[in-house]
Amino acid sequence: MGRKFFVGGNWKCNGTSEEVKKIVSVLNAGEVPSQDVVEVVVSPPYVFLPLVKDLLRPDFHVAAQNCWVKKGGAFTGEVSAEMLVNMGIPWVILGHSERRALLNESNEFVADKVAYALSQGLKVIACIGETLEQRESGCTMDVVAAQTKAISEKVSNWENVVLAYEPVWAIGTGKVASPAQAQEVHAELRKWLQANTSPEVAATTRIIYGGSVSGANCKELAAKPDVDGFLVGGASLKPEFIDIIKAAE
Ligand code: PEP
């Protein structure tokens, strides 16, 4: 069962409208494999979403970097899933480790967000991953399984979910997981999905890797059988994002 390669670009809290326009013009000029081969989704900050959506080539799509956990209302500063749908934004990143760590988003809170966003028709890039301390103490799989379990308790249809394995120690640090390390966790996650959801969900859900992916390391990572693509931070703001998309070939 083919899983289409997926490349997401997480622009985080970066950019001015001028810089955003420049990034989009580089993306629009990039020669990349067709949509049949790779799905490309870029995630600018909320305020730039309409601009990017308007300017971006039609074969690339946009994602928000977060959304509120339930229906909108008296939640100052939040943006609801319904609003994203209303604005024609198809994807949202949820559970990024920066939000888990800095804003104390728990596994349950992230899972509630994932379930609500899906219920409103959004597609979700759900992020999971262990800290360095957790890896060094040998509990990587326990951590990512608990994060995935929280989601699976609230989500039965995984069709619109991409699972992003992002070891916290590799995010923005330049310390990329080795292809073998990424493959090991992705394969274990697939086994977990097989045992705890269904063989079909395990076979079809894309598990992408994030953490210091670059033009230089993407090919080797992409060659691993359970690495179905990437979530890219820093390098998604640079022309090398095009090379990362080409790793799908
Ligand atoms: C991320 O923030 O999702 C990420 C993977 O960042 P970076 O590629 O910069 O490590």
Image (cartoon, rainbow, N blue to C red):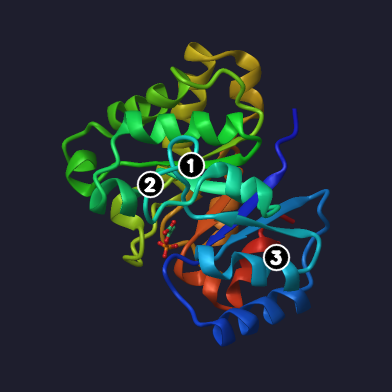
Residue 205, quarter of picture? top right
Q: Is mark 2 within 8 Å of ligand 1?
A: no
Nearer-N-terminus badge (2/3): 3
Nearer-N-terminus badge (3/1): 3
Circle 1 is placed at which residue position? 72
Q: Is residue 223 visible?
A: no
Q: Contact (CB < 8 A) between labels 2 and 3?
A: no
Circle 3 is placed at which residue position? 53
Q: Is mark 3 within 8 Å of ligand 1?
A: no
Ligand 1 quarter of the rendering = bottom left
Residue lying at the far front in this picture: please name it: 74
> Residue 188: percent from the left, percent from the top?
44, 27
Distance between the Cα atoms at labels 2 and 1? 7 Å
Question: Residue shown at 79%/72% (left/top)?
Answer: 31
Distance between the Cα atoms at labels 2 and 3? 25 Å
Residue 162, quarter of picture? top right
Residue lying at the far bottom in this picture: please name it: 18
Question: Residue shown at 33%/28% (left/top)?
Answer: 108
Q: Nearer the viewer, residue 217 or 125?
A: 125
- On screen, residue 111 above or below 170: above
Q: Nearer the viewer, residue 17 or 133?
A: 17
Q: Nearer the viewer, mark 3 or mark 1?
A: 1
Q: How many marks?
A: 3
Crowd class of label 1 (few under 14; some 14 to 19; many from 20; radius 10 Å): some
Circle 2 is placed at which residue position? 75
Q: Secondary structure at mark 3?
A: helix
- Quadrant of the frame with the C terminus: bottom right
Q: Is residue 37 visible?
A: yes
- On screen, residue 116 above or below 83: above
Inspect the image, locate mark 1, and give the three-letter code of the amino acid beneath it: Gly
Question: Residue shown at 17%/44% (left/top)?
Answer: 133
Inspect the image, locate mark 2, and give the three-letter code of the amino acid beneath it: Phe
